[in-house]
Amino acid sequence: MTTGWRGVIPAVTTQFNEDLSIDFENTRRVQDALVNDGVHGLIVMGTCGENNSLDPDEKRAILKGAVEVVGGRVPVITGVSEFDTRRAVAYARDAEKAGADGLMLLPAMVYVPKPEELVAHFKTVAEATSLPIMLYNNPPAYRVNIGTDVLRALEGG
């Protein structure tokens, strides 16, 4: 699968009101401004911290808003950072329905998996959607390293 992803694809921040509710208007404004400034794509809810701080409905609303404001000008890639594979699959499917162009998939949060469990997580999510997937590796943040053994297992060799 060829994605065409290239150039600068920042993880865009979600804006919040003083009461910690999501400021959807300013979130969309930031997304639009980045595209107008020439980025080649957006990663929406890309970090393990912000992503896991949002309710499922909030994530879906932010993604829907991003897809609408971007309007196909650049790819919209959404972070998939969930506590387990079942939730990751559900979000990946909803992201595809919402019009996301790809997924930035993280290991399941909290639990530190064995390599074969990590492979199973990634494969299960990939099989649930036709969207292209990038893997996000940040061992200091979630105590899991996506090593070459995992990558080889994912490519079938």
Image (cartoon, rainbow, N blue to C red):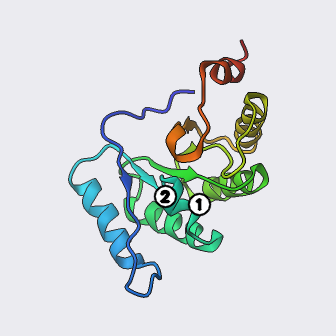
In which quadrant of the rendered view does residue 133 lie? top right
Residue type at the position of mark 2:
Met
Q: Pointer 2: what residue? A: 45
Name the residue tied to disc 1: 98
Looking at the rendered structure, the secondary structure element under dot 2 is loop
Give the vertical position of 59 relative to 40 (above or below): below
**Left or right position of 125 against 65:** right
- Picture quadrant of residue 27: bottom left
Please identify the quadrant where the N terminus is shown.
top right
Residue at image point 66% right, 19% down: 149
Is residue 136 in sight in this rendering?
no
Q: Residue at x 59, y 60 (%)?
A: 98
Q: Position of residue 96 (x, y in %)?
A: 62, 53
Residue placed furthest toward the bottom:
19
Determine the residue positioned at 38% across, 83% down: 17
Q: Position of residue 93 (x, y in %)?
A: 70, 54
Kindly identify the amino acid type of the residue bearing the numbered disc 1: Ala
